[in-house]
Image (cartoon, rainbow, N blue to C red):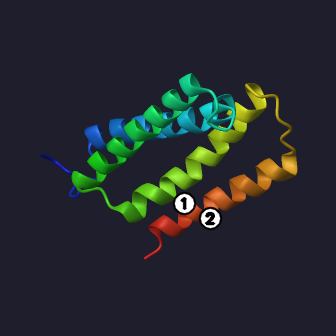
Amino acid sequence: MDNGSSTGLSARAILLFIGLIATQIAAVSMLPKTDGFASLRWTGACLGTYALSFWIMSTIIREGQPLGLLVPLMSAVIPIATIIVGTLVYHEPASMLRIGLLVAACILVSVATVVS
C-alpha cells in the first residue's frame, strides 16, 4: 500500500485526513448538546464520533503518515473550524482579536511542522 512517503501524502491519506478533521469538528460541536453527558443520545453520538475519529487517526498513522505532521495539522485546522461552528450554530461571540490571534497561532504551528 502506498503510504505516500515518496510523493507526499497519498490520495487515501488525504481523504482519511479530511474524514478525521470532519469527525473531530463534529464531535467537538456535539459537546454542548451532551449537557455535561447528561443527555444519553447526544453523549452516545459524541463519543461514537470521537471513537470513529480516533480509528481514522490510527489508520492514518498505521499507513505511515508521521504523527509529527498529523497532529500539528489538526491543531491548525480544528480550532478555526470550531470557532466558525460556535459562532454560526451556537451564536457565540468571536472578536476579531480572538480570531486573529488564533489564526496567527495556527500559522506558527503549521510553519513549525515544516521546519527541520
Between residues 115 and 52, which one lies in front from this camera angle?
52
Q: Quadrant of the rendered structure where residue 84 is?
A: top right
Residue 108 numbered tag:
2
Between residues 92 and 11, which one lies in front from this camera angle?
92
Q: Residue at 63% x, 57% y: name it.
A: 106
Residue 9 can be seen in this image: no
**Residue 10 against residue 7 in the figure, above or below:** above
Residue extending farthest to the left is 1
* Separation of residues labelled 1 and 2 (CA atoms): 5 Å
Q: Position of residue 18 (x, y in %)?
A: 42, 37
Q: Residue at 41% x, 55% y: name it.
A: 70
Between residues 45 and 64, which one lies in front from this camera angle?
45
Q: Amino acid at mark 1?
A: Ser
Residue 47 numbered tag:
none
Q: Residue at 33% x, 43% y: name it.
A: 55
Mark 1 sits on what residue?
A: 110
Q: Residue at 33% x, 61% y: name it.
A: 66
Mark 1 crowd level (few <14, some 14–19, many ≥20, 10 Å Cα): some
Q: Position of residue 45 (x, y in %)?
A: 50, 27
Residue extending farthest to the top is 41
In the rendered structure, the answer to whether residue 12 lies left or right of residue 98 reads left
Q: Are marks 1 and 2 in contact (CB under 8 Å)?
A: yes
Residue 32 can be seen in this image: yes
Q: Amino acid at mark 2?
A: Leu
Q: Position of residue 48 (x, y in %)?
A: 44, 33
Q: Quadrant of the rendered structure where residue 75 is?
A: bottom right
Q: Quadrant of the rendered structure where residue 13 is?
A: top left
Q: Position of residue 17 (x, y in %)?
A: 39, 42
